[in-house]
């Protein structure tokens, strides 16, 4: 018989210890979460106030930054100090994400202060250890700081565009210099953290976005003179690389103003087929200039004008087109020819307004004639007598004429692809005219009669933009729109050319959206 004095196999005091430890852990977690909740509240306040920078001119930034410091940053530093004092005795992983968010708002604040030439405030220092390796204590890691820097590049790329809208080009240039230097520094790091490496790879897209803004400013000759001289030095280097060994080369002087030429929209100022690439003319002392005609010419994408009106019209344009089609769809199915004829003036007005508000007219850059010195006794002509820019009214009218002419060619293409030959002639021509006004009119308006550009467009080698993307989308949509016609569904809307127009409108809107955003600047068959 077993004795009742046999000791138990498990000591009951173990469970008492585990219960006590669990309760202590709950208390610690509750205290940490309270501090973190307070810290997150201050972080949200700081980031909310920081977002106002995108709509605040530089002259009005100091009061806003003072409010950010008083209402957000100082309270963040106090909360981080409390967290450091309490949490240094406990595992670090419980609060790392909150510290990263705080670093983002802190780095954002300090960076904005630096960009507007205000000194850092010493009170903003977190006063916590950094990258501690010898003990398990509260600290800020290098990875957290770098992640915060990658977050700020996205906000800076957005700020660069908004600062141009507010007329602060100097801030845009400083942002460009900083973000390029930051990306160059990231390239020197041998990163082992996969998350950090992916985030650093994403910085290059923000750099490209800022470079696009600077490029638009240079095309419009809005950069300061010092920036123009830097661009001219790049021109000298490029010309030096392509010079021949038969003549002496004299680089252009850095003291003369640089003439910026837009390679996209100089079509109307030159005859078809001739190159519009600018060349460096011979110097006064007889030296032969280096011509850039030897370099291969590539067509550049058409960029939307950097004005608030252009951005508004750009997004409203496809909505108006699709709304017009949907409103007139029932009438289109019932009687196609009168419906298309009556809607034609509305379509012309929408397309003309979009082109005038959003696209640079052909010949808008680089078409100014060089001024000559007046002869002795000759009266000096007034500046208004030599209009260097293109006439928007004439450009629009000429583009409309070419669109009508192109509609005849598209009519023949429709017939070759299976459209009725001897019947439905008004149906086919009006469908071709709609396709021409939607897809070809913006290209005629922006590219004019540039033969090299149109060869790339017709050969599907041109870079994608809103105009060329709309052409591709409209053609693909028209092709797909023909699919339901031969099917035996016996629907009224299967009549010619209702489904074709449906595909043209839908494909144009989709192609315009893709060409102006994710596929901008890309070419078919080429990896950008």
Image (spheres, grey):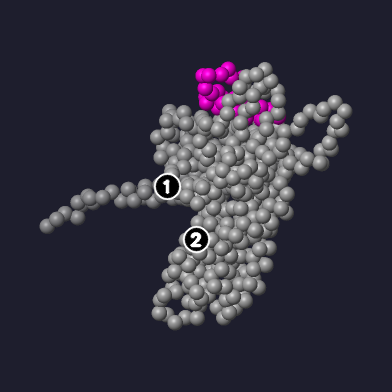
Q: Which residue is mark 1?
A: 525
**Magenta region:** 225-250
Q: Relative to 166, does residue 321 appear above or below in the rendering?
A: below
Viewer-nearest residue: 36 or 192:
192
Q: Residue at x 55, y 27 (%)?
A: 238
- Callout 1 environment at 10 Å: few (<14), some (14 to 19), or many (20+)? few
Q: Residue at x 57, y 35 (%)?
A: 179
Q: Which residue is mark 2?
A: 475
Q: Residue at x 70, y 23 (%)?
A: 255
Residue 477, horizontal then vertical, whole percent: 49, 63
Q: Quadrant of residue 1?
A: bottom left
Q: Quadrant of residue 513?
A: bottom right
Q: Relative to 429, does residue 78 appear above or below in the rendering?
A: above
Q: Is residue 233 left or right of residue 143?
A: right
**SS of the residue under disc 1:** loop
| Residue 158 in view (yes/no) | no
Principal secondary structure, stretch drawn in magenta: helix
- Residue 21 tag number: none
Viewer-nearest residue: 300 or 221:
300
């Amino acid at each position: 018989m077993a004795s009742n004095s046999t000791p138990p196999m498990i000591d009951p005091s173990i469970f008492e210890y585990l219960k006590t430890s669990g309760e202590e852990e709950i208390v610690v977690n509750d205290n940490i979460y309270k501090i973190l909740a307070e810290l997150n509240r201050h972080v949200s306040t700081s980031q909310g106030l920081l977002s106002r920078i995108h709509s605040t001119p530089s002259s009005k930034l100091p009061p806003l930054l003072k409010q950010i410091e008083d209402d957000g940053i100082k309270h963040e530093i106090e909360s981080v100090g409390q967290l450091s004092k309490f949490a240094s005795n406990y595992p670090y992983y419980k609060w790392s994400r909150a510290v990263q968010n705080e670093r983002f708002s802190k780095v954002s604040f300090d960076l904005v202060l630096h960009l507007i030439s205000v000194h850092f405030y010493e009170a903003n220092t977190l006063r916590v250890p950094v990258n501690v390796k010898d003990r398990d204590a509260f600290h800020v890691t290098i990875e957290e700081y770098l992640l915060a820097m990658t977050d700020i590049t996205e906000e800076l790329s957005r700020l660069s565009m908004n600062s141009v809208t507010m007329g602060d080009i100097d801030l845009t240039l400083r942002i460009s210099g900083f973000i390029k230097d930051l990306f160059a520094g990231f390239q020197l790091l041998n990163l082992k953290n996969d998350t950090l490496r992916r985030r650093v790879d994403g910085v290059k897209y923000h750099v490209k976005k800022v470079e696009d803004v600077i490029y638009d400013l240079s095309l419009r000759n809005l950069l300061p003179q010092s920036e123009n001289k830097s661009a001219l030095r790049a021109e000298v280097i490029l010309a030096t690389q392509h010079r021949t060994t038969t003549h002496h080369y004299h680089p252009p002087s850095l003291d003369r103003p640089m003439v910026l030429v837009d390679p996209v929209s100089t079509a109307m100022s030159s005859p078809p087929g001739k190159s519009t690439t600018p060349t460096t003319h011979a110097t006064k002392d007889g030296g032969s200039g280096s011509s850039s005609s030897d370099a291969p010419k590539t067509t550049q994408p058409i960029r939307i004008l950097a004005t608030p009106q252009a951005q508004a019209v750009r997004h409203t344009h496809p909505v108006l087109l699709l709304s017009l089609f949907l409103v007139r769809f029932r009438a289109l199915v019932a009687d196609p020819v009168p419906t298309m004829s009556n809607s034609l003036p509305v379509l012309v007005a929408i397309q003309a307004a979009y082109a005038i508000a959003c696209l640079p007219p052909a010949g808008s850059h680089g078409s100014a004639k060089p001024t000559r010195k007046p002869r002795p006794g000759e009266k000096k002509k007034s500046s208004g007598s030599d209009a260097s820019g293109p006439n928007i009214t004439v450009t629009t009218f000429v583009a409309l004429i070419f669109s009508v002419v192109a509609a005849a060619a598209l009519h023949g293409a429709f017939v070759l692809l299976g459209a009725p030959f001897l019947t439905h002639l008004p149906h086919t021509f009006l469908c071709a005219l709609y396709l021409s006004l939607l897809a070809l009119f913006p290209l005629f308006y922006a590219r004019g009669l540039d033969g090299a550009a149109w060869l790339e467009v017709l050969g599907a080698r041109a870079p994608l933009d809103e105009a060329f993307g709309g052409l591709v989308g409209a053609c693909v949509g028209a092709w797909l729109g023909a699919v339901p016609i031969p099917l035996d569904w016996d629907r009224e809307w299967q009549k010619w050319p209702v489904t074709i127009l449906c595909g043209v409108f839908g494909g144009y809107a989709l192609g315009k959206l893709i060409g102006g955003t994710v596929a901008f600047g890309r070419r078919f068959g080429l990896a950008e």
